[in-house]
Amino acid sequence: MFRRYLIKRILNGIFIYVVLIFLYSLLFNTTNEKTMKDQIEESIRVEASKLKNFTSDQVQKHILERRAFKYRIYHLDRPFFERVIWRTIDTLVFRFGNSTNILSARGDREVLRIVLEVMPRTILLFTTGILFEVGLGIWLGLKMAQKAGGPLDRTTSVMTMIVEGMPTWWLGMLMIMLFAYLVPIFPSGGMHRLPPPHGVLRIVDLLYHMALPLITLVFINTWAVAFLTRNIVLGILQEDYIMAARARGLPERRVLFGHTMRTAAPPITTIALLSLLASVFGNIVFEGIYSWPGMGNLYWVAVQRNDLPVLMGLLSVTTGLYVAGLVALDLIYGLLDPRIKVGGRA
């Protein structure tokens, strides 16, 4: 049963990803082709400048031949719909081509290298933040649900409303002003000091620069996770089987973690995994405030410089990760929640 459910969900995920990439290719086809033609013309001009012993007619003939050859390679001489299909296939196999003007740290213009270079930085900051947020949020939510209406519950509910109403960029700038200037404990941004240290000191310097944005992320997001967990657990604590477990004299810890959390696992897993997926994409405003060179920052630079190949690379990679995460979440639901009938008929 579960194998059929597994195959069906994976195939659905692949189909959705292909459709989304096709739509991206269709929407950006005109601009993408203009960028490719500009790159082709630039490479042809470089080749022509090296033809020293050729006459002007020979140079012109060479240019026309090379242009026709490159147009044929990149399918620019084909009908519109066929060109879109080829763009879609290239994107699906991660052939993004070269960037217009953005370079990697090593000076490469290959889009895939540029994207893979910044992705670990975003994962390091935001995924670490998610782990702290989910852990603290679940613990705090359980404590709130145990004593609903108590001082902790009321205080946390008020803090959730206050923090959720604050703009992220404003809170980030406030944290920089407080802890980087008024009380200079942390640096104001970046990943390393200049010049960066080497060896173990490089790791220490990275953690030191990561501390302030990490604290800001955890402070912003923990309250919402706690409030959601509190509401989920509070409803479960009113169920008959929980009251029966308490009436049998089971320890409160066993009731909470052995019965309540087992039922609350699917929605809490959804919260955690969706937050984790969102963390992979980075945050344009947050990374800009802290000068963190991740995927969000790369999005902003690519938009500013109109570097469409990099944008397409970022969109396809992040979309693929998100769709894969949703498929994984669906499968986890099928394993965690026995009420979901997988692969069979009702």
Image (cartoon, rainbow, N blue to C red):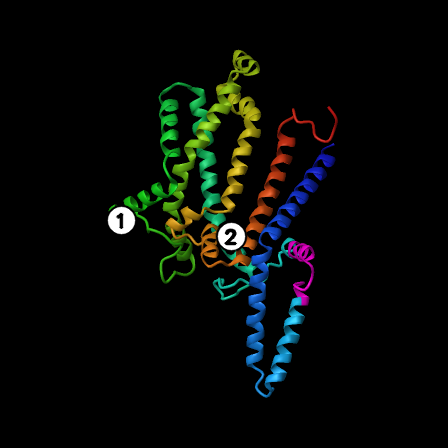
Q: Is residue 304 visible?
A: yes
- Provide the residue designation for mark 1: 181
Q: Residue at x 53, y 57 (%)?
A: 308
What is the crowding at mark 2: few (fewer than 14 residues within 10 Å), some, or many (at least 20)?
A: many
What secondary structure is marked by label 2? helix
Please name the predominant secondary structure of the magenta segment in the image: helix
Residue 10 quadrant: top right
Residue appearing at x 36%, y 36% in the figure:
166
> Residue 15 lies in magenta, yes or no?
no
**Vertical comparison of 55 with 243: above or below:** below
Q: The disc labelled 2 sits on which kind of residue?
A: Met
Indicate whether residue 75 is drawn in magenta.
Answer: yes
Please state the horizontal and vertical placement of residue 209, each as a whole percent of the image. 37, 51
| Residue 101 vertical position relative to residue 81 in the rendered view, above or below | below
- Residue 293: image location, x then y, percent: 44, 54
Counting other residues with Cα less than 10 Å from the Cα at mark 1, is it few (<14), some (14-19), or many (20 or more)?
A: few
Viewport quadrant of the C terminus = top right
Residue furthest out toward the top? 247
What amino acid is found at the position of numbered circle 1 in the picture?
Answer: Tyr
Q: Kindly identify the residue that appears in the image at 51 percent across and 19 percent down.
A: 235
Residue toward you, 199 or 273: 273
Give, as a single range, the part of the protein colored magenta: 72-89
Between the C-alphas of marks 2 and 1, the distance is 29 Å
> Could you tell whether 175 is left or right of 18 in the image?
left
Q: Is residue 253 visible?
A: no
Residue beneath label 2, please? 119
Q: Which mark is residue 67?
A: none
- Most foreground residue, 10 or 87: 87
Q: In the image, what residue occupies the spot 59% across and 69% down?
A: 40
